[in-house]
């Protein structure tokens, strides 16, 4: 360590700090090795303004405490994990890049553009195909399950011994879940849950390991995975490299395609191409680019069209494009609501907000519990099986106790009518909810004629399903929260509709639209998405006149929900301590400047640097930095003037290819941009690169590889201004300079994500390596 | 002039330029006074790379030539006008701002946020109300006109003397047009046309004088005007200041609200709230902000809802929300197209592209003609009257010659059936097209049963209407190109549909959907909008399954059209020489750096500057600069180090309030941010501010008013990088510094808009004062 510090061109702390400040922080206090923050960002521990000053000793102590419980994974909301890296959305305009661009003809640019379109088309097509496949498989498997269980129940109702049927059902359920759970727990833990929090983080610019590797999962995630595979022309999971689309092997391009994939996934799931585009934009895009958006839209369109087309073939009506999405809300009457119903809808939005907040709070505690006690694979599988069995049992008890018998209406075919104890020609109403895929149950709740459901049935269903759904989210299976939320909301919405219809006031004739509003309110209350969710709901209902009430409901549920608890995805992101960047810096942070936010001192390199120095710095495990400013005019007293920025990944490639200069003689062939692309995205660790003692004495000329014009800000720049620059340009490193352009600090995602507006003003999260 | 140059802290040319270069350009060559570019941006005349070097003498000569024809307004596409200013989208975070923010409580921030929502709601409501008003007035006036003309024609058919009726019609038409034209030509010339190019420019960040002042006009423009008025809490046109919403009196906030207004306008026009949002984003937003988008969406929703609601009252069915937009395409059958029709749609897209390009080329020549010869008000009014009369005459001739008689179908009521020479019980088919508002005619073309229109009729109509519509766009009346394009496209689309139906192949049963595709193709071919237009069309048809074909049609028409001519709005923007910024820098411009792009030398001020100097610089009419870097360490040999940026408008306010320091004594009260807001947006010219000789000797301390951390880039930054920064942050001034942070140049909108990709690679536009 001491060896390195001597060689590396450390920039000193910024000059205008009082002498003595910050320097004490560099002492080798116990536990300091564990936390980069303490070693390298001493300067930024000084707070001014409204922030409560954090005592260093206190921080160290709390860290020590954490270390005492090694088996317990920290789940502190006030932590920010250092294990997540950022994506490089900024283009590295080094000499290699300029040379390559210079050699490209205008025709070449056109070809690249056309490839982008082709890839987006492919992404859309494959996502649609996968959606179609999933849809058909789910339909067949579900039909099979319902048929068997129904036969046995029907049989046992007559012969007695109903207990056997519930056991059968529970076993069937558990078997399916166990299969899924085993795959997830053993092979790909990240496939658990809906994948939406992960995709949100990825689009936000956080590199979540393995997030876009091949796996099955809900549609949004599937689309993203397809996009990552197709756009790179290879798949590491499948160990296959097609050697095409090599131009797109960098974070910038890949993220754009993943946006398209996520949009295509939404589009296929809900038949909502515009909603898909808006989802991608809302979650990901910082810089709005017209052509990119247009391509994303293209992928979405192709995706919903493919699904529609192949489903029409499967249904035997080729070309009859009537199923744009996996979940279809069915056709709602145009203009079927009245102005005086809007206050009712808004109240329902508030109910959705409260229920959603309750759901989220419950799930939060459950997740904490899981993190603490259920972190072994076998425990996770057992939990999943238990949940499946419990679902079957509870459903069964509900059906058994229910005396809600219904005669099937004219226009509604009940696919698996369960008679149970009902008179002949009638069926058990609650059984139809359970004996259908949730998608179909939602549609039934929206469209079945008034009186199809008994109010008590709906209440009992809402009550039990609330807890079951809450338990299910976060299990080690690939399952989302969208459909359960919709079903839950539709149930209590329908209940409100029933009550209004029964109130005797004739104007509330149709409980279906209340089910729709309930579904929107519940979903909004849980996930708290705004614009994109409105458009998705509007597209799924296929009726633009419902736009305003849906929007009002979603707004209300978000406002009310935000008052009590955060959105479900945000909770899970926080529990993972992901450095997620919001849309804007906290409103009260104008008095903060880059000087307080940045990490300093910064590890810098010279334009021509000794190989040994570089290897030592990269090997320094206590400070796994990823970007290194290149400086000139560096003396021991003063920090150097910024003249470039180089990434760890670039240095790794340079070291791997041994681009060393010995006695002013380049020992290797000149590198091309292609060499960097080939190594993308899994650059080898520094430990795997062997550098001999002789080679350590060589130098490396970084000039033509570095980004010669990194974005910089002066130290006095306010936090919102830094934030805006960082967010708008999708940066990973932002160099802070003094008024002579000398490097005094570096702002990364973690430095910005650390600040958030809590209940007592601006709060600061702690950084942790876990 | 010499006087000023001595006093002002000119920064010298960047050091690393060879001596002698650039300096010659500062000579007082003839004509140089007229063109700021020659005086102040000598340095940037040096081009490297693929750019053809522009000889200075040549430039001067061409300018001289232009000056010889003073009556002719230049219409050179290769010019960029210097008369347009930029909006300040960047927040000026000076000390006053920080103080104000510091005094605001978290509650205060919430109040501001709530006001934003309230304003957006108001914008939506008022826009919807205006749309409703326009709709009803147009309907009444049109009904009145058609009734009179029909009566006379019916009468004359029997009695003879049909000539009289055409004269009557022509006179009626002309009278209406004359009224509109007179208002526009005399009071508000900018209200001519659709207003969309102007709004495009405004949202792009160009200050178009008087663009958002009170006037009538098509919906998009109306929405924008309403937004500007409401958000500022005052109207200069109406000379009324409500003293509310003063916080929003700055460019940043105003532009956000104008985006919302434009979206609300689109939303009311087409019943397309999502399309409206996307229109605003596509044209305006550079930085995607979730909350802003959500607010824009809210305004759109309220707007379409308001229109819908008041129309339902007008139609006698209060609460029956069936008319979301002014133009309604009517309900299309779901999934009514087949896969094999898609190639036909794509071909139609190509036809639309070709026709659109032809339309645009014709309109381009017409506009050139108008600029040259019809620039007096009375000539403009006469032209408008002529066009109206010609429309009536041509329509009349068409009707007269047509023998296309139709029996009204069961489901279609013809409101003003004109029998003419048809047998009893039938009506002249072409007359129904003319004797309806174009909106209704479009709907009829989409939905009337097969066989309603004779192919010859459609052909003749397309042919004549093409020229009439082309003539109409650009007349001195407030009229857009959207509806005429739709009508034109629907006509030839229906024609293609007719031909296919008559081809005997039974599968092409419905010509209506071809009319829809034709309308999309024609509109796309003329305006070349992409994403937003697709969504607008999909929302107007109310059927998401038509999304893919509409998108394919629009894509094709754009690609084909772009091959021949530019989009209509872009043509008009170019003819105005507006410095419009595209989405990205030209693809081949990576070899360009900020050094070549920037204007230099830059006029700078010291932190404490003499009042006389400031007044002289501001009064310098030959260089109406708007932003001045503040420098320190300035010597005569070296440019100073950047330490801030101040705007002309700020200096004007400071001078007006006489914030002078005399013998280290501030003579006036301290200014507040409110004083700057009160002066916004019409800051008085420097000439109107009287500064006595004594006061000239005082100094002004600019420190607390300047923006202390303007964004800067090093000289080596590539053009695309500069462009991205400029665009993403909505900048007006970007300071270029050397590696010691010394000011060497300034990049403004004009410097970036100058480069565009022509047919022979990168081209550079000339700058002109006109």
Image (cartoon, coloured by chain):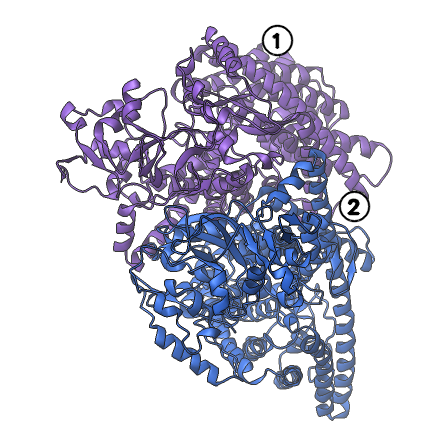
Chain colours: A blue, B purple
Q: Would residue B298 be seen by someone viewing this image from the given angle?
A: no
Give me the C-alpha separation between circle 2 and circle 1.
51 Å
Q: Residue B509's spot in the image, x, y percent?
A: 79, 39
Label 2 is found on which chain of the structure?
B
The picture quadrant where one finds residue A276 is bottom right
**Is disc 1 surrounded by few (<14), some (14 to 19) or many (20+) residues within 10 Å?**
few
Q: Nearer the viewer, residue A466 or B726?
A: B726
- Name the element at disc 2: loop
- Asked if residue B533 lies left or right of residue B208, the reply is right
The chain holding disc 1 is: B
The foreground one among B250 and B494 is B250
Q: Position of residue A633 (x, y in %)?
A: 44, 48
Between A494 and A713, the one nearer to me in the picture: A713
Please indicate whether residue B709 sits to the left or right of residue A135 in the image: left
Residue B546 rendering spot, x and y as whole percentages? 69, 45
Q: Give above or below for A678 relative to B627.
A: below
Q: Which is nearer the eye, B84 or A424?
A: B84
- Left or right of residue A86: residue A181: right
Which residue bears the numbered disc 1? Answer: B161
- Dot 2 or dot 1: first in sequence order is 1
């Amino acid at each position: 360590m001491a060896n390195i510090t001597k060689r590396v061109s450390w920039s000193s702390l910024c000059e205008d700090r009082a002498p003595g400040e910050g320097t004490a922080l560099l002492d080798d206090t116990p536990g300091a090795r564990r936390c980069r923050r303490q070693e390298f960002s001493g300067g930024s521990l000084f707070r001014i303004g409204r922030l409560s000053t954090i005592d260093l000793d206190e921080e160290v102590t709390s860290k020590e405490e954490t270390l005492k419980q090694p088996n317990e994974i920290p789940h502190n909301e006030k932590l920010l994990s250092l294990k997540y890296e950022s994506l490089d959305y900024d283009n590295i305009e080094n000499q290699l890049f300029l040379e390559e661009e210079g050699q490209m003809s205008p025709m070449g640019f056109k070809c690249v553009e056309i490839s982008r379109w082709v890839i987006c088309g492919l992404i859309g097509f494959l996502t649609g195909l996968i959606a179609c496949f999933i849809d058909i498989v789910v339909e067949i498997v579900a039909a099979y399950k319902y048929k068997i269980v129904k036969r046995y129940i029907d049989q046992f109702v007559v012969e007695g011994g109903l207990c056997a049927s519930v056991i059968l059902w529970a076993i069937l359920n558990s078997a399916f879940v166990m299969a899924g759970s085993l795959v997830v727990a053993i092979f790909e833990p990240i496939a658990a849950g809906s994948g939406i929090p992960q995709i949100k983080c990825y689009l936000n610019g956080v590199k979540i390991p393995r997030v876009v590797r091949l796996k099955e999962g809900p549609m949004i995630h599937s689309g993203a995975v397809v996009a990552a595979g197709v756009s790179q022309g290879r798949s590491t999971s499948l160990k296959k490299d097609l050697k095409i689309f090599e131009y797109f092997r960098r974070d910038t391009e890949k993220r754009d395609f993943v946006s398209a994939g996520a949009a295509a996934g939404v589009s296929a799931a809900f038949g909502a191409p515009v909603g898909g585009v808006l989802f991608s934009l809302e979650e990901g895009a910082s810089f709005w680019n017209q052509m990119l958006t247009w391509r994303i839209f293209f992928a979405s369109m192709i995706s919903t069209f493919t699904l529609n087309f192949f489903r029409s073939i499967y249904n035997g009506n080729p070309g009859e494009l009537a199923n744009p999405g996996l979940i279809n809300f069915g056709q709602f009457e145009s203009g079927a609501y009245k102005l005086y119903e809007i206050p009712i809808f808004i109240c329902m939005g508030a109910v959705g907000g409260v229920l959603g907040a309750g759901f989220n709070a419950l799930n939060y505690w459950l997740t904490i519990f899981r993190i603490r006690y259920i972190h072994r694979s076998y425990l996770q599988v057992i939990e999943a099986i238990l949940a499946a069995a419990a679902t079957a049992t509870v459903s069964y008890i509900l059906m058994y106790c229910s005396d809600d018998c219904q005669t099937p209406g004219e226009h509604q075919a009940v696919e698996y009518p369960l008679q149970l104890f009902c008179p002949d020609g009638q069926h058990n109403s609650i059984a139809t909810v359970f004996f259908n895929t949730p998608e179909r149950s939602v549609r039934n709740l929206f469209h079945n004629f008034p009186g199809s459901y008994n109010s008590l049935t709906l209440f009992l269903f809402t009550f039990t399903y609330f807890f079951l759904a809450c338990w299910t989210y976060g299990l080690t299976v690939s399952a989302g929260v969208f459909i359960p939320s919709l079903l839950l909301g539709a149930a209590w919405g329908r209940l409100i509709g029933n009550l209004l219809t029964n109130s005797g006031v004739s104007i509330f004739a149709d409980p279906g639209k209340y089910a729709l509003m309930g579904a929107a309110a519940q979903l909004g209350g849980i996930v708290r998405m705004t614009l994109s969710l409105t458009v998705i709901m509007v597209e799924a209902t296929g009726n633009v006149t419902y736009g305003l009430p849906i929007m009002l409901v979603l707004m209300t549920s978000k406002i009310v929900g935000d008052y009590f608890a955060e959105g479900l995805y945000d909770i899970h992101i926080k529990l993972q301590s992901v450095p997620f960047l919001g849309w804007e810096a906290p409103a009260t942070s104008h008095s903060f400047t880059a000087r307080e936010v940045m990490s300093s001192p910064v590890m810098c390199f010279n334009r021509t640097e000794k190989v040994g120095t570089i290897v030592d710095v990269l090997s320094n495990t206590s400070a796994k930095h990823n970007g290194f400013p290149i400086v000139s005019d560096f003396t021991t007293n003063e920090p150097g003037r910024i003249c470039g920025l180089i990434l760890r990944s670039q240095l790794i490639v340079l070291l791997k290819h041994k681009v060393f200069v010995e006695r002013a003689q380049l020992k290797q062939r000149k590198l091309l941009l292609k060499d960097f692309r080939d190594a993308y995205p899994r650059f080898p660790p520094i430990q795997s690169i062997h550098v001999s003692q002789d080679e350590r004495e060589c130098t490396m000329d970084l000039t033509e590889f570095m980004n010669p014009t990194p974005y910089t800000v002066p130290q006095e720049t306010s936090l919102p201004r830094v934030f805006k620059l960082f967010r708008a340009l999708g940066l990973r490193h932002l160099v802070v300079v003094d008024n002579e352009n000398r490097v005094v600090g570096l702002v990364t995602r973690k430095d910005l994500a650390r600040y958030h507006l809590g209940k007592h003003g601006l709060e600061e999260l702690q950084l942790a390596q876990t």
